[in-house]
Structures are given as C-alpha cells and as structure tokens.
Image (cartoon, helix red, strand yellow):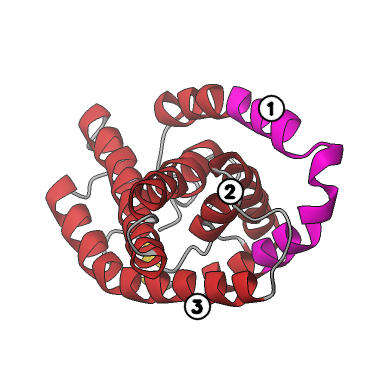
C-alpha cells in the first residue's frame, strides 16, 4: 500500500511532513530514552520482521500494492509511538534501498502505516483485551491494516480531487482495488499478530504491555 514517489504533489506531501515531523520528535524523545534499553532487542527484532514482510508486495490496479504491515504488534506490546518511529524507519530504508514508496511521500506513508493503522489497532486492543486477548489481538491486527489502507486510499483520493490530471485514477476504482485485497490480507495480519504476541508472552519478555 506504499504510495510511490510522483503520485502525490507537494500540496499533499508537504502538509504530511509538517504533521509527521513533531510526532516523530515527540515519539523519539518519549519512547526511546534510557528506560527503553531493555526493550530494544524486542523492538529491533519486530522492526526487522516488519521490514521483511512489507517487501512482499502484491500490485493492485492504480499503481499501489497490498501487503502485510507487522507494526501493529509494536503498538500493542509497547505504544503507538514506538510503532510510528519503527515503521518510519522501515519506510525510509525501503525507499532508499529498495525503491519501494519514496522519500517525498515518506510523511504520507508514515502517517498511514505507522500512526493511523497501529493507532487504531492499539485502541481496539485496549478495548477488547479484557474480554479475550487472542481475539483482541486478531481484530487489532486486521483493523490496523484496514485503517492504514483506507488512509493511503484517502491521500490518493485527495490528490485526485485537487488535480485529476496529476493522479487520474478515480477514487472508486482505487478504493475497490485496495480494500478487497486488504480485507483478505488482514486475516493473515491478524493471525501473525496473535501468533507473535503469544510467542513473546510465553517467553515472558520484560517491557511488554
């Protein structure tokens, strides 16, 4: 679901960077201090896994793709701010090393896949974990992917509204081509979230939520 370079004009990308920058700074300062040292091996490992699974992209009509995220787990275990910083790093590395997404659209992709998606997953997890932790983790993983997908589709729809000649794909076509695969991929995302959380909880790792 990465938005590639060239799909969005500065009218969209610059405000996204303006919105993302203070959240990057705040998240890094509040979640990656000395108190997080013990959690860094887990955070680093989960970020590496997210990097790998996000490189497996299935192209969809309109020029984007569908894929798993893996970062909702970071929000559930630690905090949405951790997920935002880690996903931003993943996106930066993918853009510079693999040509996936892009640097100019980093703010948009980070907000969609690193903040809004994991943030929604975290809210669902907080609301449902008292009832059933496995169900809560599955729903959180599934919903997080849907919110990220809809956020990316929303950014592309906004660009179409601002300038159809710049991004000519109609929002209805873009939405349908992205949402249907995302609904199915979300099932795998939810299963991964449940399995990974179960493994980590059984290991009794410190610093987990």
Would residue 120 be counted in the magenta stretch? no
x and y percentages locating residue 35 in the rendered image = 82, 40
Residue at 58 percent across and 55 percent down: it is 77
Residue at 60 percent across and 60 percent down: it is 99
Q: Name the residue under label 1.
A: 25
Estimate the spatial distance between the alpha carbons at disc 3 and disc 1, rounded to whole Å.
31 Å
Q: Name the residue under label 3.
A: 195
Of labels 3 and 2, the one closer to you: 3
User: Main SS type for the magenta part?
Assistant: helix
Would residue 36 be counted in the magenta stretch? yes
Tag count: 3
Label 1 or label 2, whichever comes before in sequence order: 1
53 shown above or below 132: below
Task: Between residue 106 and residue 130, name the one nearer to us.
Answer: 130
x and y percentages locating residue 1 in the rendered image = 40, 58
How packed mark 1 is, by other alpha carbons closer than 10 Å (few <14, some 14-19, many 20 or more), is few
Of labels 3 and 1, the one closer to you: 3
Q: Mark 2 points at which residue?
A: 83
Residue at 48 percent across and 29 percent down: it is 16
Whether residue 166 appears in this view of the structure is no
The magenta stretch is: 21-48
């Amino acid at each position: 679901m990465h938005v590639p370079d060239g799909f969005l004009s500065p009218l969209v990308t610059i405000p996204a960077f303006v919105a993302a920058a203070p959240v990057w700074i705040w998240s890094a300062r509040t979640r990656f201090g000395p108190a997080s040292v013990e959690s860094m091996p887990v955070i680093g490992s989960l970020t590496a896994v997210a990097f790998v699974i996000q490189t497996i992209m299935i192209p969809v009509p309109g020029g984007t793709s569908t894929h798993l995220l893996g970062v909702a787990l970071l929000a559930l275990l630690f905090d949405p701010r951790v997920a935002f910083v880690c996903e931003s790093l993943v996106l930066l590395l993918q853009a510079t090393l693999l040509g996936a997404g892009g640097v100019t659209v980093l703010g948009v992709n980070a907000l969609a896949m690193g903040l809004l998606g994991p943030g929604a997953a975290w809210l669902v997890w907080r609301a449902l974990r008292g009832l059933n932790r496995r169900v809560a983790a599955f729903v959180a993983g599934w919903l997080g992917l849907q919110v990220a997908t809809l956020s990316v589709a929303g950014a592309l729809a906004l660009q179409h509204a601002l300038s159809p000649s710049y991004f000519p794909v109609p929002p209805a076509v873009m939405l349908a081509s992205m949402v249907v695969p995302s609904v199915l991929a979300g099932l795998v995302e939810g299963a991964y979230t449940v399995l990974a959380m179960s493994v980590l909880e059984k290991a009794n790792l410190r610093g987990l939520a």
